[in-house]
């Protein structure tokens, strides 16, 4: 059995060795050394869509932000303002 982790989501699956060649696109071999779970706090490993969903769920004003770095900055600013209240 081979184990694979999906890029972006962190989902880990076990696949019969005879079929592991089908998991080339979007998957990489997983040896258990890295954590398959995503951080609860947004960071650079999150996708833009995930950052936008987080912002929507937490009522973060993104303004004109569309790039990952800008989205993270807006989220960080929002979270800092909540901590200082």
Image (cartoon, rainbow, N blue to C red):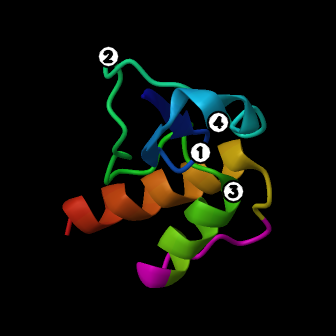
Classed neighbour count for the residue bearing mark 2: other residues with Cα under 10 Å, few (<14), some (14–19), many (≥20): few
Q: Residues within 10 Å of mark 3 (few under 14, many from 20)?
A: some
Position of 75 with respect to 35 (left or right) is: right
- Residue lying at 58% horizontally and 63% vertically, measured from the top left: 50
Q: Give the residue at x 56% y 74%.
A: 53
x and y percentages locating residue 14 in the rendered image: 43, 40
Disc 4 to disc 2, C-alpha distance: 23 Å
| Apparent side of residue 12 relative to residue 44 in the rendered image (left or right) | left
Q: Look at discs 1 and 2 and give the one toward the viewer.
A: 2
Magenta segment, prevailing SS (helix, strand or loop): loop
* Residue receiving disc 3: 48
Q: CA distance from mark 3 to mark 4?
A: 31 Å
Q: Is residue 76 above or below residue 26?
A: below
Q: Picture coordinates of residue 16 (x, y %)?
A: 50, 36
Dot 3: element? helix
**SS type, badge 1:** loop
Q: Give the residue number, with chain letter if any, for mark 1.
A: 8
The C terminus, quarter of image: bottom left
Q: Which residues are the magenta region?
A: 57-64
The earlier-in-sequence mark between 4 and 1 is 1
Quarter-wise, where is residue 7 in the image?
A: top right
Residue assigned mark 4 = 19
Element at label 2: loop
> Observer-nearest residue: 15 or 68?
15
Circle nearer the N terminus (3, 4): 4
Distance Cα–Cα, label 3 vs label 1: 11 Å
Residue pointed to by mark 2? 33
């Amino acid at each position: 059995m081979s184990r694979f982790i999906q890029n972006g989501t962190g989902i880990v699956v076990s696949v019969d060795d005879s079929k592991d060649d089908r998991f080339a696109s979007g998957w990489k071999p997983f040896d258990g050394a890295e954590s398959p779970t995503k951080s609860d706090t947004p960071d650079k490993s999150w996708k833009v869509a995930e950052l936008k969903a987080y912002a929507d769920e937490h009522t973060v004003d993104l303004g004109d932000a569309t790039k990952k770095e800008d989205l993270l900055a807006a989220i960080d600013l929002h979270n800092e303002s909540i901590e200082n209240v």
